[in-house]
Image (cartoon, rainbow, N blue to C red):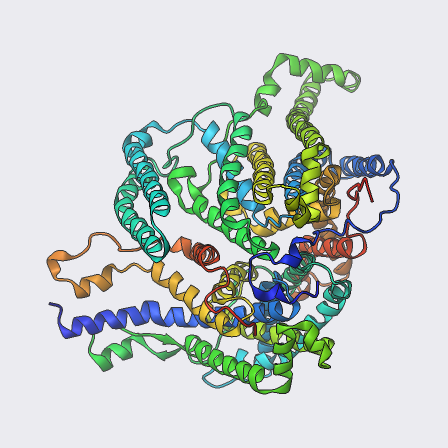
Amino acid sequence: MTDTSLNSGPEKTEAEKTSAPVPTAIVQKRQSPWRAPFVFALMAAALVAVGMGQSWSVALAILNMSLVSALMAMGLNLQWGYAGLFNAGVMAFTALGGLAAVVVSHEPVWDALHAGGRGLALSAVIVVAIIATAAFISTQMKGRLRSFAIFVVVVVGYLVLRPVFGGAVDAVESVDPARTGFIGGLGLPIMASWLVGGIFAAAVAWLIGKVALGLRSDYLAIATLGISEIVIAVLKNEDWLARGVKNVTGLSRPVPYEVDLQQAPWFVDLVTRFNANSLQAIADQADRDAFLRQLLIEASSAFVKIAYAGLFTVVLLIILALCVRALNSPWGRMMRAIRDNEEAAAAMGKDIKARHLQIFVLGSAIIGIAGAMMTTLDGQFTPGTYNPLRFTFLVWVMVIVGGSGNNLGAVIGGFLIWFIWVEAEPAGRYIVELLSANMDPDSPLYRHLQDIAAPFRLFVMGLVLLIVLRFSPRGLLPEKVRHS
Amino acid sequence: MPEGTDILNALVLMTNFVFVPALAYGSQLALGALGVTLVFGILRFANFAHGDLMAFGTTIAILFTWALQAQGISFGVLPTALLALIPAIVVTAIVAIFIDKAVFTFYRRQKAAPVVFVIASVGVMFMLSAIVRFIMGTEDRRFTDGERFVVRALDFKKWSGLDEGLAIQTTQAITVVVTLIVVIALFWFLNRTRTGKAMRAYSDNEDLALLSGINPDRIVMITWIIAAALATIAGTLYGLDKSFKPFTYLQLLLPIFASAIVGGIGQPVGAVVGGFVIAFSEVMLTYAYKKFATYLVPENLEPSGLLQFLGTDYKFAISFIILVLVLLVRPTGIFKGKVL
């Protein structure tokens, strides 16, 4: 890229439209068909190793978040790998999915709705009225006058909205603020929120796409990064919606609770049958009961995690199948054609803007689904914990390392990077222990070294990203180029 | 009609809570945005690692501050960190050049797309933020010393006889003065010296610059030195003014980008203006004007609410609302046209 117009502004320049985000044009070495199964088998082996070495509970926890991460990576891969859109707002869509989990599954807080529901509804009407008036003006007027009229409408509308909305919010937030203080949700099963999370994310993505998709790639990155911060700021501070930084905890579950399982006869029966031999070896009745109780606690926790893993796997497989089918279809071919050469695709009559918007919305919807699943798994919605390193850039590392433009690559990227992210901390602690083995535990250096383990994962992530980008820029499972 | 003293009180109130903080914050943003804009103008990518480069520079400055304090050296009424800036800039510049050699040079040779640089800068961002946390941990640190105030609120009240006090912290005054010096020096460098002109030429038209015998490697190296110096100064001034916490520098990246783009990316003047535009909007839109209004309107008309446009929690969001508006209405920013 030696083009001089690069620095002339955020609009895409002619030369850039022809640039592919990944160097797919490089003639590819023939890839072994066993590469993907081999990589996945290695990943499974690593998880099993964690199960045997550390604990099965940790391994299952990694597996569950890996499944969610894989879904996030697939959503981003759709946008970046197949359309070349630099979306640095993954965090926002994840959080919107989490919001959906609250809105769908939490019981409605009737007191709050009685107190402030009417005011909130009126605020919504005012907002719609402002938007409608602005839209009407923009079709009727032109030039400076139009900008001025829209500005006046927005300012006047805001001044009208502010007291109505503020009063409603105060009313809602003062209803038992220690426990609720928000409007609650619909009280539906939380599984429904996975779909709703996708819809929330898609709706916001449509808005963002309308605004930002015309920008050249790094401007798009900055714009989406900023918009995602705005979304998080809103979620943190609008307490009436989902309690903000006070968090919503104790969300309902799609799987049984451990306590109920430990009481359920069928489950006790199952565990007893599985461990019949070791139980019989214990002679004393009281000891045997104590041992059985211990077994039940472990088994119920594992059962819950496995149940989540099963649900997540089903969702992942459905979306993976849809993605693979879509991207092998003429539609997918068109998307790749647009990515590799926008000019030529436009010349063939493809509507670049509409297709970009479409795939941006689809990818964000997948991320939203994953976000809702993550909040379901956590059982709580904590807006304060969303930060771009963990929720945007980590997903980027997953896509780049896995192989942009390859769905299986995104999945393995999600698994591998989440695995490293979790395991880097114990690894860091181990290294610290080696370093400080012979040190005086009271010395300041020793105490300082103990703090190093946590940021060690950031270091490893950066290193992995840079190494992959440099030496294997197409990732672990590169995109298959069918016709080169 | 409000009386003369009421108007004066209102003005002092605004100066104390809006003008002075916004001026200091704007200076910090301007310095950060200058670094981003220079890297963008010369190397042609948005450097996501700039926030963490600032944090790194500040870390080194804090280490030198501690070393100086341990030696019993201080800078009189001024914070010792100002002395530590000079060695810190040297170290940060060396690190920046090392990062360029280790990471970015490869992609420049390949003539990779700007996005690849951006992704690589994300990798650098991860590693730098880890190194900063290795050295400093994650907690808040204050490292300012010397005299705390230039003007004290009580002294000002006594001197002026007004109800409102005006306090100017040393760090705020230093921030503005240092920024002024740095910006003047940078503009002199870019517009008057041979190397500066070469940089502008390179930014304007790379091929033409190469044809005229400008050495691109040298230009890139000098760009990193200046960017590292700006990052260190901006980061240290911010840390002196508020406090040092690694995570805040990642958050600072966003308003810095906004400043650079609002002003017109690749335009040094734009970066400075953009920094102040963002800072003043953030402070003015989140300030509660209730007290200000009570001075100016008759008593029976006093406002009931806080007269605040947006909650202070939306401080960071404001910069991005402005950014999005600018991208929509005037995508090239305030100063468009020639770059650098």
Task: Choose between B188 and A178: the one closer to the eye.
Answer: B188
From the viewer's perspective, is B247 left or right of A420?
A: left
Q: Quadrant of the N terminus of chain B?
A: bottom left
* Image point (74%, 48%), residue name: A401
Where does residue A350 sit, x and y in percent of width and height? Answer: 62, 41
From the viewer's perspective, is A415 left or right of A359?
A: right
Where does residue B246 sit, x and y in percent of width and height? Answer: 57, 61
Where does residue A399 sit, x and y in percent of width and height? Answer: 70, 45
Q: How many marks?
A: 0
Q: Quadrant of the C terminus of chain B?
A: bottom right
Identify whether A339 is placed above or below B258.
above
Task: Choose between A289 and A187: the one closer to the eye.
Answer: A187
Where does residue A147 sit, x and y in percent of width and height? Answer: 35, 54
Identify whether B95 is placed above or below A306.
below
Task: Choose between A156 and B171: the one closer to the eye.
Answer: A156
From the viewer's perspective, is A274 left or right of B316?
A: right
Residue A171 falls in which quadrant of the image? top left
Q: Is residue B163 visible?
A: no
Q: Is residue A248 visible?
A: yes
Task: Choose between B121 and A52: the one closer to the eye.
Answer: B121
Identify whether A100 is placed above or below B192.
above
